[in-house]
Amino acid sequence: MGAAEVLVLAAVVAVLFWLAGPVRRRLERWLGRRLGLRRSTGGRVVVLGRRRNGTFSREDRHDQ
C-alpha cells in the first residue's frame, strides 16, 4: 500500500466520521429520552482530603 492509498483511506475515514456526528447525536438524544436519562445541569463538587498514608478521603478520619 502506497502513500497515496493511505492518504485516501485517511480522508475517507475522516469524512465518514464527520458525517456520522449528527447521526450519533440524534441517537444519543433518542436513547436519552427512551431511557429517561436527564443531563445533569449542575454537579456536586466533593473536595477529597489527602490522608497521611497518601490515600484520599471524603471526611477527615483519624487513621493511625
Image (cartoon, rainbow, N blue to C red):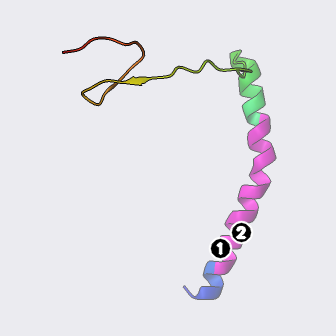
Q: Residue at x 61, y 18 (%)?
A: 44
Relative to 25, say whether 46 is above or below. above
Residue tagged 2: 12
Where residue 18 sits: x, y (%)? Answer: 76, 57
Q: What mark, if any, has residue 57 been given in the picture?
A: none
Residue tagged 1: 9
Where residue 6 sits: x, y (%)? Answer: 61, 79
Residue 20 lies in the magenta-colored region? yes
Mark 2 Cα-neighbour bin, 10 Å: few <14, some 14–19, many ≥20: few
Closer to us: 54 or 39: 54
Relative to 1, say whether 56 is above or below. above
Q: Residue at x 71, y 15 (%)?
A: 36
Quadrant the N terminus occupies: bottom right
Q: Residue at x 77, y 29 (%)?
A: 29
Task: Residue lying at the far left in this picture: please name it.
Answer: 64
Residue 54 occupies quadrant: top left
Residue 43 occupies quadrant: top right
Badge 2 amino acid = Val
Relative to 8, say whether 22 is above or below. above
Segment tinted magenta in the rendering: 7-26
Rounded to the nearest angstrom, the CA distance separating label 1 from label 2 is 5 Å
Quadrant the C terminus occupies: top left
Instruction: State if disc 2 and disc 1 touch (CB < 8 Å).
Output: yes
Mark 1 Cα-neighbour bin, 10 Å: few <14, some 14–19, many ≥20: few
Residue 28 lies in the magenta-colored region? no
Closer to us: 28 or 44: 44
Q: Identify the secondary structure beneath mark 1.
A: helix
